[in-house]
Image (spheres, grey):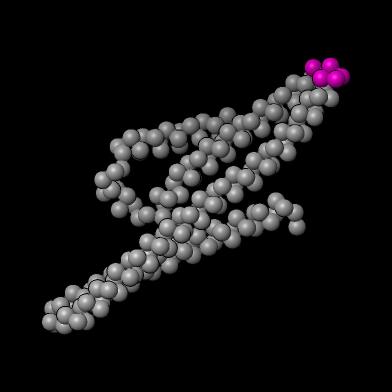
Amino acid sequence: MGNAEKLMNQIMELKFTSKSLQRQAKKCEKDEKSEKLKVKKAIEKGNMDGARIYAENAIRKRSEQMNYLRLASRLDAVVARLDTQAKMTTISKSMSSIVKSLESTLATGNLQKMSETMDQFEKQFVNMEVQAEFMESSMAGSTSLSTPEARRERTPWRHPREKVEEDDLTRRLAELKARG
């Protein structure tokens, strides 16, 4: 098994782990809601000690949920970096072969071959741009994906231009894909 395959397997394992952490966070959120209902019922029955215990459980579950989400977000960032590294390694190998081809073409002076090599180089460059755009957008979205949308929408620090910028990135990515 080559280094590239090992890296891709590691990336898949990290993605799986991240999804697992996100599922655990959702489970904690459900448990927190359940504990809050128990607090409400205990207060209605006048059981303040029980309500306090349930409230502590709810707080602990909330903290646990946030820890799972933080860890999942960090893993997503690591996955994105590893994925970028794997793609850059592949592109680097392609670029080195193109450079060698250009050197041999320049030595022979064959303009047709030189044109084909430059076309191949341009195609690789466009592919690299598309991959870089995709990675940038996934990196930007990796932390926001782990936060429920309802919470993101009512977050006071959310900038109004954020949606416009996301639409612009999507449009640019579609244009790059159409060219390639």
Q: Residue at x 37, y 54 (%)?
A: 147
The secondary structure that most of the magenta stretch takes on is: helix
Decide if residue 140 is on the left or right side of residue 82.
left
The stretch in magenta equals: 106-111
Decide if residue 96 is on the left or right side of residue 141.
right
Asked if residue 4 is positioned above or below residue 62 in the image, the reply reads above
Q: Quadrant of the C terminus?
A: top right
Decide if residue 30 is on the left or right side of residue 79.
left
Asked if residue 31 is positioned above or below residue 180 in the image, the reply reads below
Q: Residue at x 59, y 48 (%)?
A: 83
Residue 2 part of the magenta segment? no
Please identify the quarter of the rendering in which residue 51 is found: bottom left
Asked if residue 83 is positioned above or below residue 180 in the image, the reply reads below
Residue 101 placement (x, y as % from top left):
80, 28
Residue 159 placement (x, y as % from top left):
31, 39
Q: Residue at x 25, y 78 (%)?
A: 53
Residue 107 part of the magenta segment? yes
Q: Residue at x 70, y 37 (%)?
A: 92
In the foreground, 148 or 172: 148
